[in-house]
Amino acid sequence: MRLHQRSADLTKRNQFQTETLPEIQLTLPYSKKRFGVPQNLHVIGTMNTADRSIALLDTALRRRFTFKELMPNPAVLSPNVGGINLQKLLTTINDRIEYLFDREHQIGHAYFTGCTSAEAVEDVMRHKVIPLLSEYFYEDWSKVAVVLGDGPQGPSRFLEARRLTAPPGIAADDFSGERLRWRVKDQFDFSEFAP
């Protein structure tokens, strides 16, 4: 009984609030009922500009709505999570992505906001960031390695490269350039990003 009465009180209060607020009203075309939206209702949507499959929708929305760009903000991240400076990590990765690809494909700070330990950062890198980079660069692991600061001759922080030799029946000259097999390391080295 009390729950029903409380629900009725809330309904009355909501009706009163809706009725007292100025609203935009129109008549629905099929039911002919009046429909109103309060003036203080704001619709907020998000869009990832890196997703080019929605380019036509993007153009249509840009003509009708106000857009506010929200780029990655490393300053909201901790400078020391388990001995890793997340601000430096994100800035370094994004600078490299922008140089190799474009600014629209930078990694957002939200990937790291929930990280409270080195293990959590490693998990984000292994299961979110590295697969995303692989997708961005169409499985070109040499570019993924550059973004991560790894290389076949340089340090190996996140990825390992192994030189492949030509199998029997294939001459080494048949394919130009060095052939490498990349793999994600079992243990990551975050020493470049120490606080």
Image (tube, rainbow, N blue to C red):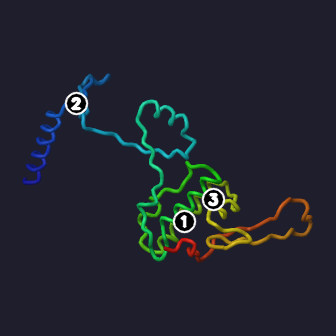
Give the image location of residue 185, x and y in percent.
63, 74
Q: Quadrant of residue 26?
A: top left
Which amino acid lies under the numbered mark 1 shown in the image of this protein?
A: His
Q: Which of marks 3 and 1 is nearer the N terminus?
A: 1
Q: Mark 1 points at which residue?
A: 127
Q: Which of marks 2 and 1 is nearer the N terminus?
A: 2
Give the image location of residue 159, x and y in percent.
65, 70
Residue toward you, 104 or 7: 104
Label 2 element class? strand
Q: In this view, does 31 lie to the left or right of 9?
A: right
For disc 1, the neighbor class at 10 Å (few under 14, some 14 to 19, many from 20) is: few
Instruction: Relative to 143, say whether 83 is above or below.
Output: below
Q: How far apart are marks 3 and 1 (CA)?
A: 11 Å
Q: Mark 2 points at which residue?
A: 23
Label 1 element class? helix
* Residue appearing at x 27%, y 38% in the figure: 41
